[in-house]
Amino acid sequence: MTGTDLGMPAFPPFPEAAREAVHDEVLRANLRHATHTIRDKRARAVAELDDWDRLRAAGKAIKDHTLRHLDRYLLQLEAAVTAAGGTVHWAVDADEANRIVTGLVLATGEREVVKVKSMATQETGLNEALEAAGIAAYETDLAELIVQLGHDRPSHILVPAIHRNRGEIRDLFRSEMGRWGRPAPEDLGDDPRELAEAARLHLREKFLRAKVAVSGANFMVAETGTMVVLESEGNGRMCLTLPETLISVVGIEKVVPTFRDLEVFLQTLPRSSTAERMNPYTTMWTGTGTGTGTGEGDGPTAFHLVLLDNGRTDTLADEVGRQALRCIRCSACLNVCPVYERAGGHAYGSVYPGPIGAVLSPQLRGTANPIDATLPYASTLCGACYEVCPVAIDIPEILVHLRERVVQGGPVTREGVRVRIRPAHGHTAERAAMRAARLLLDRPGALRAGERLLSRARRLRPQRLPGPGRAWTDTRALPDVPAESFRDWWARERKAPQK
Amino acid sequence: MRAALFVTCVNDALYPRTGIAVVRLLERLGVEVDFPAAQSCCGQPQYNTGYRRESEPLLRRTAEAFAGYDHVVTPSGSCAAMIREQYPRIGRKAAEEGRGSTLAALADDLVPRVRELTEFLVDVLGVTDVGAYFPHTVTYHPSCHGLRSLGLGDRPRRLLAAVKGLELVELPGAAECCGFGGTFALKNPDVSAAMGADKIRAARATGAEVLCGADNSCLAHLDGTLRRAGEPLRTLHLAEILAATEEEPLR
């Protein structure tokens, strides 16, 4: 394995990618409208529950407990799934997961699969791997379909096409749907009902023909071996029930100990993600449905569960960073993040954008490349993400922790081995400046002398700074320098000479 | 009552008038104010940029400068949050790294005594009407660390609402970050500027004459943006409004 692959090619550093997005007026308007709409709805849905804080604490506690005993619960899960007629596969990284799924599909003799919206298979780049093996993968989630038709990348965890408006989607449907299957009507308008109907007819063909489906899962129950998928459209349920073979690729952190634990998450996840009181389509299945593997009754006759590590065990080894593994992918943090709102999801160079992506990607992939070394800085540390997180992930704390890893290096776990990484390149001047500032600030005498020098030279203060200072003065005037510092005023006013 | 003023490095060097306002305000309310000259910076710029070890001497300095004071008051939610949230973490990590428990002990001793200005006024002194006079329309931007880390809630707005002559207008999207974020303003200048511009658009739409805040670092970013754009809207630290009276109005 050559570093964990989150299914994305090399990306520019965050500030560069964000710069482009910030100046894209259409994108800014699309994102602002969408994030504010979901944000406000979520706030109302959460405010309805008087025990929200306790649900949040319970979700955190369940996840922390599970992560602490992850080995045990995964083995329990494997046993339960196997007993119910399913087959469990273990994938240490993206390549292995893709190899397993490709092999399973080829073994059925089929050359196409329908897909339920899944972050894990986005993470592994499964569609590309299947394509390379001559297998067509059709996304059936409406937003994922829009992304796939547009040869685009998802920019949001829950609403991957959040960066597209209705007009753009209509144009895509008209020009692209015919190449994948049933074409959109010639006179398709941009009314949401019309767009949804075009997608429905296009997808219905695929559902009725498909023999193999690939999904992820929101939760896996260790005690029963039950898989749980939450979705809003019903397209997921079509995939989970109609085909003969179902393959689910799921991150190992998605396990919960008992069926009863779902009580908490089935309240917090819908309200946090889509602002719904109850999730519209919650599909649960245990093995092959009949529990005996005979193929009688509803649902697929073959079920494969691919448990994906891909950097998660290494992340679990980090005492501060491991809390990111509590994430239930609700995307509430994206919708409240002022940086995400302006930079858009693509700037994060990962299938996991926004605040959670800024703490997940550099842990799953490491901090060596430019995008991952800049993601921990893609935040003002305003704390809005932590406030809305339904499993109380202290994202600002992890961000600062990862910043330290970037500039100072330190101990990390890579492929199960504890190693010490070196500081990232390009922080030499900053390190020197931080040290110089500390040395000055740690000597009040020198600080006072510096302040006096600044005051005496106040009329020389430039309008615009050179070098790194330009980043401030390009859009902002510098503050006026006062004639005397506070400490000099105090000394003069109180006639108390300072040391 | 006696209290030590932690003026913060930004206020000391660039906004002494905020520090002076805190002194006048607290003395008017009967508090004896001290300014321990050994103080400097809380270490937040270093810590939040990833240089935790560089912030340790400043933790030590801050804790030692304010040793023995029952009340340490600071006109910055961000610096108060740095002390309250991060000092214990810095101390704990130093201990875990085998460098002793001195920093942890210093942090534990200091943290419960430090209060942001509005906390001190409302919770310790028990006042919301501080006898101020400021005949202007004001809108208030609650900076993130005060709002979310300290949980200042409506303390600042209650204090402002009680100011004679002051008309308080609500800032739409007040809870959203202004885009300063310390070194974020330099590392991600485009996003930072876009956030600042949006915040100012919201403030301007209120029709207020003054955009008030309780953190001068955020206000430096907003004021700099306003002045570069030639906007007449003025930024002011809350302490300066609360210090103004009919006898001694704000200049």
Image (spheres, rainbow, N blue to C red):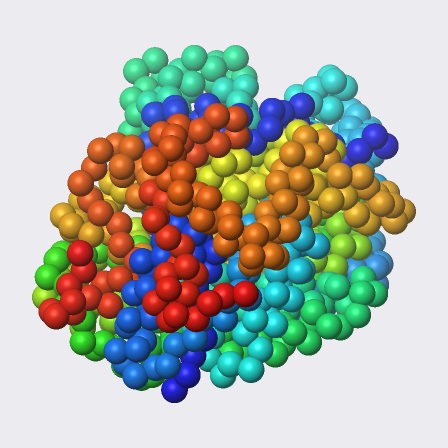
Q: Quadrant of residue B85?
A: bottom right
Looking at the image, which is closer to me, A334 or A384?
A384
Please report the residue visible at 65 percent of the width from the left and 66 percent of the height from the top: B60
Question: Relative to A365, is A337 on the left or the right?
Answer: left
Please report the residue visible at 46 percent of the width from the left and 44 percent of the height from the top: A453
* Furthest residue toward right: A417
- Residue A345 visible, this angle: no
Looking at the image, which is closer to me, A236 or B243?
B243
Please report the residue visible at 25 percent of the width from the left and 71 percent of the height from the top: B159
Q: Which percent across, then down, holds residue A101?
A: 77, 33
Q: Quadrant of residue A396?
A: bottom right
Number of numbered discs visible in the structure rendering:
0
Residue A21 vertical position relative to residue B89 in the rendered view, above or below: above
Residue B22 vertical position relative to residue A142 in the rendered view, above or below: below
Q: Which percent across, then down, holds residue A208?
A: 57, 30
Looking at the image, which is closer to me, A287 or B141?
B141
Looking at the image, which is closer to me, A129 or B130?
B130
Question: Relative to B87, is B177 on the left or the right?
Answer: left
Location of the C terminus of chain A by quadrant is: bottom right
Q: Quadrant of residue A455?
A: top left
Q: Which percent across, then down, holds residue A169?
A: 39, 24
* Furthest residue toward bottom: B1
Q: Which percent across, then down, holds residue A182?
A: 48, 18
- Residue B140 visible, this angle: yes
Location of the N terminus of chain A by quadrant is: top right
Residue A342 vertical position relative to residue A453 in the rendered view, above or below: above
